[in-house]
Image: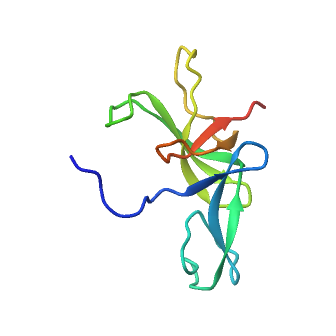
């Protein structure tokens, strides 16, 4: 099976000031819509956009544990949709404690911190203790 062509569709993450990561995206000048991608115009209204950074903190909107194997991803692993503070919703892998006896989803409504991107380009978050 060959890899799909074209640009990487995942949001780009840069190192943040505190060692976390920030998503490099866009914010619309007209309607204030945010995007995790470098669109040339606002996806909501078509207006002009400015570069913006979002994160490193966010709130889990939804989460799951994937228990089926896919190439390069031995199960189980956790995924979460995260609403970045003042930013867009992104899909990220949740860092799992390797010593845990069970893999549970990230808590919905829980706080997470975006980490710098791995070599494979996936977004990573870690659960922030309450």
Q: Choose top left, top right, bottom left or bottom right for residue 112.
A: top right
* Of the pair 120 and 126, the residue shown nearer to us: 120
Residue drawn at (70%, 81%) of the image: 29
**Residue at the image point whose x is 21% and y is 46% from the top:** 1
Please report the residue visible at 38 percent of the width from the left and 28 percent of the height from the top.
74
Residue 85 location (% of width, % of height): 73, 55
Examine the rendering and report whether any part of residue 59 can be seen. yes
Of 76 and 38, which appears nearest the observer? 38
Residue at the farthest front position: 119
User: How far across and down, in percent of the image, does residue 8 sit?
Assistant: 43, 58
Left/right of residue 16 with respect to residue 36 in the rendered view = right
Q: Quarter of the image holding residue 12?
A: bottom right
Which residue is at a point 74% across and 60% down the rendered structure image?
86
Q: Is residue 9 above or below residue 68?
A: below
Q: How is the image coloured?
A: rainbow
Image height of 83 relative to 42, above or below: above
Q: How many marks?
A: 0
Q: Is residue 109 visible?
A: no
Q: Quadrant of the C terminus?
A: top right
Is 72 on the left or on the right of 16, as rendered? left
- The picture quadrant where one finds residue 38 is bottom right
Q: Position of residue 89 (x, y in %)?
A: 60, 56
Check the image and name the residue furthest to the left. 1
């Amino acid at each position: 099976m060959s890899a799909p062509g074209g640009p990487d569709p995942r949001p780009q993450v840069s190192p943040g000031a505190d060692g976390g990561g920030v998503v490099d995206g866009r914010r619309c000048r007209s309607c204030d819509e945010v995007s995790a991608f470098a669109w040339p115009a606002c996806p909501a209204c078509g207006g002009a956009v400015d570069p913006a950074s979002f994160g490193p903190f966010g709130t889990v909107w939804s989460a799951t544990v994937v228990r089926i194997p896919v190439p390069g991803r031995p199960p189980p692993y956790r995924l979460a949709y995260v609403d970045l503070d003042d930013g867009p919703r992104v899909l990220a892998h949740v860092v799992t404690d390797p010593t845990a006896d069970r893999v549970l989803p990230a808590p919905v409504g829980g706080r997470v911190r975006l980490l710098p991107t791995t070599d494979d380009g996936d977004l990573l978050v870690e659960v922030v203790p309450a």
